[in-house]
Amino acid sequence: MRVLRVPVTCCRCGEGVERSGAITIEFQGRRDYECYPCYQTHSAWNAYSQEVKKSLYCQRCNYKFVSKKLECPYCNKLDFVIDSEIKVDELL
């Protein structure tokens, strides 16, 4: 099987890239191509994946965990989930 190395232009930066190294974007019947570096920097999915994991603590089941969601993986409740980083001012 032959692989065609058809050059396409990126819709963001305008550089010529191989079709196998580009991501196809279809919008309103129009097909555009985006190179991988542009996809990494400008993608909406990229913003979603950069959510930070937080250190959390569930007071209901006394379970400490790290997660992006504010839901305890042990008891599946979210009413007693708090931030587990306790400061000195909170202890006094």
Image: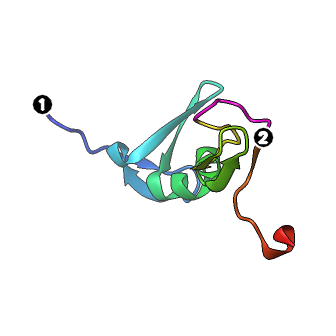
Residue named by callout 2: 80
Does the magenta stretch mainly form a helix, a strand or a loop?
Answer: loop
Residue farthest front in this picture? 92
Of helix, strand and loop, which one carries label 2?
loop
Which residue does the image show at 26% across and 45% down from the upper left? Answer: 5
**Quadrant in which residue 55 is drawn:** bottom right
Viewer-nearest of discs 2 and 1: 2
Q: Position of residue 9 (x, y in %)?
A: 47, 50
Above or below, 62 relative to 14: above
Q: Which range of residues does the magenta coloring cover?
A: 74-80
Q: Quadrant of the N terminus?
A: top left
Q: Is residue 1 left or right of residue 90?
A: left
Q: Residues within 10 Å of mark 2 (few under 14, many from 20)?
A: some
Residue farthest top in this picture? 29
The disc, 2 or 1, on the residue closer to the chain's N-terminal end is 1
Residue named by callout 1: 1
